[in-house]
Image (cartoon, grey):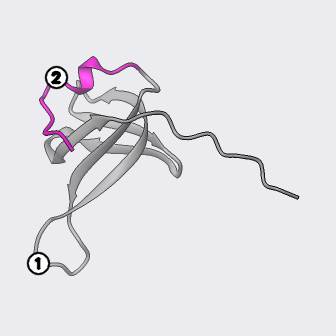
Amino acid sequence: MLSMSYDFFESLRPGERIVVRYRVAPAGGPGPGLTDVLGGFAGLYDDGATVAVDSRHGEVRIERRLVTHAKRVPPAPVRRARRA
């Protein structure tokens, strides 16, 4: 993944597919871990302090200060119909 700049999210259009890596505190862990979210860019909230991504599991809101990396990704592949 590419290291993100502060202006990255401001350059996105709603619905553009992105992946975001951000810090989370693991349950019972010694320190912060990392996780990813993949989906369409939903927008910025709280005067740009929060990023929203529409993932397969619903909207995920992430504080920008927790984001370590982000990048655009190609559209999801089209699923083929199942054979009978």
- Circle 1: element type: loop
Q: CA distance from mark 1 to mark 2?
A: 32 Å
Choose between 84 and 22: the one closer to the eye. 84
Residue neighbourhood size for the residue with mark 1, other residues' Cα within 10 Å, grouped as few (<14), some (14–19), many (≥20): few
Direction right: furthest residue? 84
Label 2 secondary element:
loop
Say whether residue 56 is left or right of residue 38. Answer: right
Q: Residue at x 27, y 36 (%)?
A: 71
Type of residue at label 1?
A: Pro
Which quarter of the figure is the N terminus placed in?
top left
| Magenta run includes residue 6 | yes
Q: Is residue 42 left or right of residue 26?
A: right
Tell which residue pokes out farthest to the front in this image.
83
Task: Return the residue at label 1.
Answer: 30
Read off the residue under disc 2: 7
Q: Position of residue 26 (x, y in %)?
A: 23, 71
Q: Is residue 45 left or right of residue 17?
A: left
* Residue at figure coordinates x 19%, y 39% from the top left: 64
Judged by its main secondary structure, the magenta piece is loop
Q: Is 48 drawn above or below residue 67 in the view shown?
A: above
Q: x and y percent of residue 80 in the render?
A: 70, 46
Residue at 14 percent across and 42 percent down: it is 65
> Measured from the top left, where is residue 3 in percent x and y?
13, 39
Q: How many marks?
A: 2
For the magenta stretch, what is the residue range? Answer: 1-13
Residue 19 at what x, y percent from top left? 33, 42
- The part of the image, by quadrant, that contains residue 40 is top left
Give left or right: position of 2 versus 35: left
Asked whether 20 or 23 is in front, the reply is 20
